[in-house]
Image (cartoon, rainbow, N blue to C red):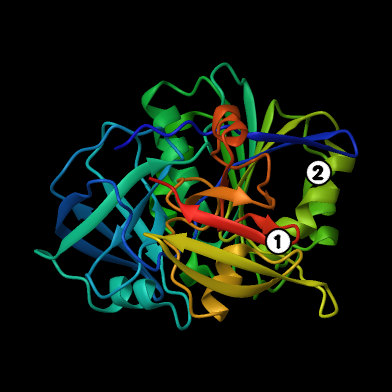
Amino acid sequence: MIAIAVIAGVVVLGGLILVFSKGGGSATADTAPTEPLLKWTVTKVTKETPSTVSFEVDQGLSFKAGQFVLIRPKPELPFRAYSFSRAPGEPLRLTVKHVPNGQVSTHVTQALEAGDVLDVKGPYGQFVLPEGAKSALLLAGGSGVTPMLSMLRALDAKGWPTAVRLIDGNRTQAEIILKAELDELVQKSQGKLTVQHVLDDAAAAPKGPLTAEVLEGLLGAVETPDVVALCGPTPMMDAARPVLAKRFAGVKVLEEKFAAEAAVSADAPTCTVTVVDKGKEKSFAAKQGEHVLAAARKGKVSLQAGCEMGACGTCRVKVLSGTIDTPADSCLSDDERAQGFALVCVGKAKGDVKLEPAP
């Protein structure tokens, strides 16, 4: 892996400290990352739920519990980001949930076989529990539980130095990912881990999905933890933030996002983005507030990308003129920002911009 400095952005919202991370869900790339790729051979594929599979590989990798890698199962497919569902030091395993119309998740959940060779890049991400935390609250939705399984298995290996409460939202009982492992961890923790499953089809309360109202009820009697980790679908995470801000003011919250999203007004001003590559120029229109990468795709201009959540740095560009506003929670270092680098996957053009792909 090429060394990339990931700086967690810190935002104060209503007294709540948000520390944003990236990954956990899926991400896209138009072309492969320029750095050398790892090659993993699949050794085992296991169906976990009707929509989810786990797969194991023949290689090892040094990573932190909660991190993810970029995976490309076939050269004609894009890269996607998936989290490990085991702890560092254990045989590598990734767990993937099918996403409707998802190219890679469909292939992995329906066609991946032992012997298949994967292109891999990583690890990436700052969705990692801080050392020394005595208590943690984990809020997961669907496949958002996969990086949390890695965290829990790592805590189990250390003898449970952190007490954990996990709230795990799913549509049905059958869709709870790796439930048997969660049950085993609860037993082994001797009271240090509690897990509450919240199902959309539950006959009685608490009944999902994890809306703000449901979360307020679930968290009402929970003692203030040292850290909160949040990973799941965008509606769940949007609902959780104000509840957490009100209930646990000042507590650090780690977020693992499935995707970077931007709300763009239909009447937003339009600017021109020009890409200079090997002496040739291509331009496309972008609305102010729109991610540059999304605008490039609409304009049929290819820009390199990886995780598409600002965590891996694959989409880094050098801004020659104009401004691309890259969020503070991205992986760009202060030095890179000072040198004029930006990330197009989460960066937004502020007026006309000229850029070139970063070396």
Q: Nearer the viewer, residue 24 or 191?
A: 24
Measured as percent of width and height from the top left, residue 106 is found at 35, 78
Local packing at callout 2 (Cα closer than 10 Å; few below 14, some 14-19, many 20+) is many
Q: Which mark is residue 338?
A: none
Helix, strand or loop status at disc 2: helix
In this view, which residue lies farthest toward the front?
279
Mark 2 or mark 1: name the one nearer the start of the chain: 1
Which residue is identified by label 1? 236
**Residue 26 shows in this picture:** no
Q: Quadrant of the N terminus?
A: top left
Q: Nearer the viewer, residue 98 or 321?
A: 321
Q: Is residue 66 above or below residue 270?
A: above
**Residue 203 shows in this picture:** yes
Helix, strand or loop status at disc 1: helix
Q: Is residue 280 above or below residue 145?
A: below
Measured as percent of width and height from the top left, residue 317 is found at 50, 50
Residue at image location 26% in from the left, 31% down from the top = 89
Residue at image location 20% in from the left, 60% down from the top = 118
